[in-house]
């Protein structure tokens, strides 16, 4: 199999999987128990939190563990809105956000908040002029992702922080799922940040929520009070230890990974970019990561391209795994102003640490072979 769907999820590092198994076998006690076994397990939890905090360059007290970025996004957005409710009722988000952010904002809108959508430019970057136009003294919440999951645009987080200096009341949340460890970000300048381990070769179902100031995010679920009462529920120690291991391994290899991905993206764009009808929605550009490449064909549905590549055991995806079933036209691509035809015929190729040069060559060969059939379909439809 050639697996190029790494923005959806990645294979675990062997060492991270070994840690997961080992902790399940040897440290299965509850970290909240006051018996000695529990206390020992709690030490392991502390060590993992410290390691993750060090890599993210923040204080360990500001790291909370969740069941993944969907939950982190929900807690941060709903919790900040609950805290700031008395100070204003306007909230801002862009339409290129992941559903775990976008739908949470829409839920707040139903509760009575006024929701403003900030526009993005052709590349999918948040439009700072539009952001300034939308910010008011009643605005209390803004969420912008670090890297887009559908086409890989890097958002201008530092510039947004500058704009927000005039609006200290605004809680600024960043969905860091596709950018964490991979792109630079100064977490001390944002209010909250989320990540999921399975995007950097850790286990699924475990995530991070960084919160700069706990008192600015009310808890939105209730239970035993774990994680400073921000995320109740028995601590998933095997997954946390495994996530810390994956994060360390990934961050140690980051330069090597980036260099390789740059070469791979260039090769894909050079080889496929010359095909007559093919459009590149993720150019080789400093505003895009190299690990997510969105391309498109007219007159053919993305699903048909996926099925055709499936026949040769090549795994890519349409737009995004979470939204592809739900929307007939991907909202994020639509927000960029791309044509409906382009969007319907788009696919996403996404790379990981495990992606090899042979994978890329194999994908290019299969795609070029299949393209002959695609071209016939396109020309008969024009
Ligand atoms: N945000 C972004 C940008 C994502 O790509 C994803 C995963 N597709 C999520 C949030 C949600 O992560 P999880 O499914 O691990 O909760």
Image (cartoon, helix red, strand yellow):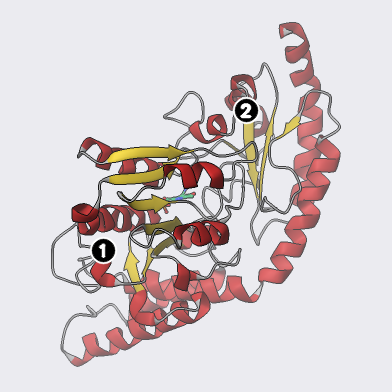
Q: Is residue 64 visible?
A: yes
Eyeballing the image, is 295 above or below 244? Answer: above
Mark 2 — residue?
338
How crowded pointer 2 is (Cα within 10 Å; few <14, some 14-19, many 20+) is rated as some
Q: Quadrant of residue 102?
A: top left
Q: How many marks?
A: 2
Residue 42 lies, in percent from the top left, at 28, 84
Mark 1 — residue?
217
**Mark 1 residue CB less than 8 A from any atom of ligand 1:** no
Q: Is residue 149 visible?
A: no
Question: Which mark sits nearer the N-terminus, 1 or 2?
Answer: 1
- Asked if the residue under mark 2 is in contact with the one under mark 1, i.e. CB atoms within 8 Å, the reply is no
In-image side of 178 versus 310 (left or right): left
Q: Which mark is residue 30?
A: none
Viewer-side residue, 71 vs 2:
71
Eyeballing the image, is 203 above or below 340? Answer: below
In-image side of 336 versus 370 (left or right): left
Q: CA distance from mark 1 to mark 2?
A: 36 Å
Residue 226 lies, in percent from the top left, at 21, 72
Q: Residue furthest left?
A: 223
Residue appearing at x 45%, y 73% in the figure = 188
Viewer-side residue, 265 vs 19:
265
């Amino acid at each position: 199999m050639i697996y190029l769907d790494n923005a959806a999820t990645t294979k675990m590092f062997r060492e991270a999987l070994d840690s997961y198994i080992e902790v399940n076998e040897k440290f299965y006690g509850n970290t909240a128990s006051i018996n000695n076994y529990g206390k020992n397990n709690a030490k392991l939890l502390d060590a993992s939190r410290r390691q993750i905090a060090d890599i993210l360059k923040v204080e360990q007290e500001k790291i909370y563990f969740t069941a993944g970025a969907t939950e982190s996004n929900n807690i941060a957005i709903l919790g900040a809105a609950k805290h700031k409710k008395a100070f204003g009722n306007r909230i801002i988000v862009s339409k290129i956000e992941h559903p775990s952010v976008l739908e949470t904002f829409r839920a707040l809108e139903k509760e009575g908040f006024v929701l403003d959508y900030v526009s993005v430019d052709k590349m999918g970057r948040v439009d700072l002029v539009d952001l300034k136009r939308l910010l008011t003294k009643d605005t209390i919440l803004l969420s912008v992702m670090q890297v887009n999951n559908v086409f890989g645009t890097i958002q201008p987080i530092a510039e947004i922080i500058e704009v927000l200096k005039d609006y200290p009341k605004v809680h600024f949340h960043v969905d860091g799922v596709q950018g964490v460890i991979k792109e630079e970000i100064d977490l001390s300048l944002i209010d909250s940040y989320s990540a999921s381990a399975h995007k950097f070769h850790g286990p699924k179902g475990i995530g991070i929520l960084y919160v700069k100031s706990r008192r600015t995010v009310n808890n939105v679920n209730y239970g035993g009070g774990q994680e400073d009462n921000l995320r109740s529920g028995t601590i998933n120690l095997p997954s946390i230890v495994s996530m810390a291991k994956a994060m360390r391994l990934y961050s140690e290899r980051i330069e090597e990974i980036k260099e390789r991905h740059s070469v791979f993206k260039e090769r894909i764009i050079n080889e496929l970019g010359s095909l007559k009808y093919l459009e590149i929605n993720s150019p080789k550009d400093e505003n895009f990561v190299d690990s997510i490449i969105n391309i498109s064909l007219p007159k053919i549905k993305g699903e048909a391209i996926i099925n055709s590549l499936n026949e040769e055991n090549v795994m890519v995806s349409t737009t995004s795994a979470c939204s592809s079933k739900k929307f007939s036209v991907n909202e994020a691509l639509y927000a960029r102003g791309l044509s409906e035809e382009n969007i319907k015929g788009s696919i996403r190729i996404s790379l990981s640490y495990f992606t090899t040069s042979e994978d890329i060559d194999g994908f290019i060969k299969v795609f070029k072979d299949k393209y002959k059939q695609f071209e016939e379909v396109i020309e008969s439809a024009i």
